[in-house]
Image (cartoon, rainbow, N blue to C red):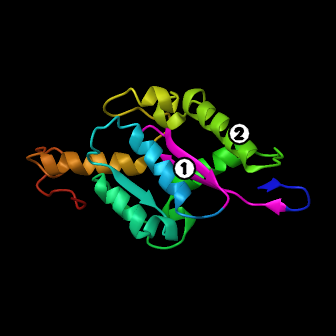
Amino acid sequence: MWKSAYYYKFCYLSLIMDAFTKEIVGWDVGPTLGLEYPSNALRMALGRLKGEKATDLIHHSDRGCQYASSEYVNLLKDNNIRISMTETGEPTDNPQAERINNTIKNEFLRGVRFTNINEVRAAVAKAVDFYNNERPHMSINMMTPAQAALCDGEIRKWWVSYRERAIKRNQSLENSENPLPLQPTLVAYETSQPPVNL
């Protein structure tokens, strides 16, 4: 939000974040919720591919009219990007987007007064640069998103994701010859009757 001479005006931030590295790879600020600004953010993100075709990318968003528009959907499809949208309008369906929006607004822009949209854009550019290049994250081994973008393979977290742990355990069980998590053992009993709780 910024204040002109006599009234407040709203502006809208569009962000594209790489879920693996937490890096903001595309962004734009516009005076409306129009399609132009999210499309600009997506084009910025696509520009980082340096002419290579996207492979195995999924674009996850809420069900905002700009993301569901035929133009935006076609831009995704033209670049071989699979589309995922929240089931409902619940913010909890897209927690990474909610978190990055909160970080930008409350860590970087809180309490700042703007008098025009160009000031907002300049502040967002600085915030994105700081976020990507100087702010470490526990979810990417205390690296910055720019450092994480240089990594291949799994990145260690500084916290436990029980969901990921369960997924890995289930995958290893599916790939093993013995689908049971316990190794078979032989038990010898010295009495003529086995214990009751087998």
Q: Is residue 195 left or right of residue 32?
A: left
Residue drawn at the location 34% of the way across and 62% of the way down: 74
- Quarter in which the C terminus is drawn: bottom left
Which of the two residues, 40 or 98, is positioned nearer the viewer here?
Answer: 40
Disc 2 target residue:
123
Which numbered circle lies on residue 15? 1
Q: Is residue 53 above or below residue 96?
A: above
Specify the quadrant of the image occupied by residue 155: top left
Q: Is residue 47 left or right of residue 56?
A: right
- x, y percentage for residue 66? 50, 66
> What amino acid is at disc 1?
Leu
| Element at label 1 | strand
Image: magenta residue range: 8-31
Instruction: Estimate how packed mark 2 is, as few (under 14), some (14 to 19) or many (20 or more) residues with alpha carbons within 10 Å.
Output: some
Residue drawn at the location 75% of the way across and 43% of the way down: 119
Q: Is residue 17 magenta?
A: yes
Q: Is residue 163 above or below residue 74?
A: above
Residue drawn at the location 55% of the way across and 33% of the way down: 132
- x, y percentage for residue 76? 35, 57
Which of marks 2 and 1 precedes in the sequence? 1
> What amino acid is at disc 2?
Ala
Residue drawn at the location 19% of the way across and 49% of the way down: 173
Q: Is residue 74 magenta?
A: no
Which of the two residues, 181 or 82, is positioned nearer the viewer here?
Answer: 82
Which numbered circle lies on residue 1? none
- x, y percentage for residue 22? 49, 40
Q: Is residue 66 above or below residue 59?
A: below
- x, y percentage for residue 123? 71, 39
